[in-house]
Amino acid sequence: MTPTRTSASQTAVTSRLTVRGLTLAYEDRTVVHELDLAVPDGRVTVIVGPNACGKSTTLRALGRLLKPRGGAVLLDGTELSRIPTKKIAQSIGLLPQTPVAPEAISVCDLVARGRQPHQHWWQQWSDEDERAVTDAMERTDITAIADRSVDELSGGQRQRVWIAMALAQETDLLLLDEPTTYLDIAHQVEVLDLVRQLASPAADGSRGRTVVTVLHDLNQAARYADHLVAMKEGRIIAEGPPEDVVTADLVREVFGLSAVVVPDPVTGSPLVVPGAPWAPPTPTGKAPRT
């Protein structure tokens, strides 16, 4: 088993959401093995790794959608399994990879469902609910389509609606599984910029939201993450600031890719450039040696 490498430059941080010895499985197939993780408060944590390495499975467990086979996920020191569902919904917002909307529901009605954990039987809707929904739709640029049916939307528009619903929930912790799926490059940047804004301190100095997201694009992860977690075969291989984690050796070990890592010319974050370029096959059917 490869030991987890933690960046030496990491300083002590507070963490409301922690994982201890977490083992996750589907029937007889173990997907995540004895994982330990402390999610830094008020920061963006991005989980990366190859397909089927356990990224999304781990995120599901953080949101109590998957019961651990071993170990535990803790919120403020208490196992999620011991916390009432409504209290968890008021603290942790989760956008799964492939959410399903009720048939014929409108955009504004779907976003409004994010307010359900905050409502009571004696007060079904409030001015605070209205403000949260309006703000979430404005932030995700869907106000103009508020009355349209979700069924009529493109994949990118639908994804922004789901993100708006998660934002309307106004939880301190936000879990996003592949939030840029179906989005073109411009909207990918908009969504990830929004994620960064959510984790930024407020004007009054209060801490921003804690965000954990799964991304496939390693360069986007390195640009937007405060804390990067690299997984392989159900285990954490390395974690820490992107500039410490993303190296040519790490890319080779985790993704099996020969690459050069250079500073991003815009942000200075690590930028992964694949090594040997693709070349067309020779007449013998083999790619030329590089």
Image: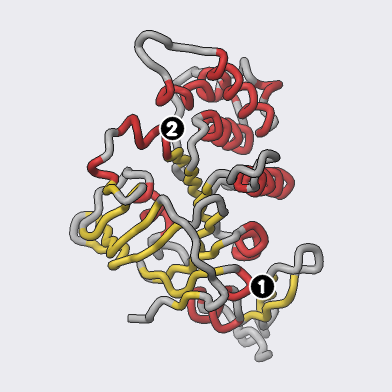
Residue at (48%, 12%) from the top-left corner? 125
Ranked by sequence position, the earlier of labels 1 and 2 is 2
Residue holding disc 2: 100
**Measured from the top left, where is residue 70 in percent x and y?**
21, 59
Farthest residue toward the bottom? 289
**Measured from the top left, where is residue 287 in percent x and y?**
63, 84
Label 1 amino acid?
Val
Callouts 1 and 2 close, C-beta under 8 Å: no
- Quadrant that contains the N terminus: bottom left
Using the image as rendered, state which of residue 245 and residue 9 is in the foreground. 9
Residue at (63%, 22%) from the top-left corner? 134
Q: Is residue 11 left or right of residue 31?
A: right
Residue at (38%, 61%) from the top-left corner? 54
Farthest residue toward the front? 204
Labels 1, 2: front one: 1
Using the image as rendered, state which of residue 214 and residue 182 is in the foreground. 214
**Measured from the top left, where is residue 251 in percent x and y?**
56, 77
Cα–Cα span, label 1 and label 2: 34 Å
Using the image as rendered, state which of residue 18 and residue 235 is in the foreground. 18
Identify the element where label 1 is drawn: strand
Q: Is residue 201 left or right of residue 71?
A: right
Give the answer, above or below, for where 229 lies relative to 149. below
**Measured from the top left, where is residue 115 in percent x and y?**
47, 23
Label 2 amino acid?
Val
Mark 2: few/some/many CA within 10 Å (<14, 14-19, 20+): few
Write down the quadrant of residue 155 in the picture: top right
Q: Which label was assigned to residue 272?
A: 1
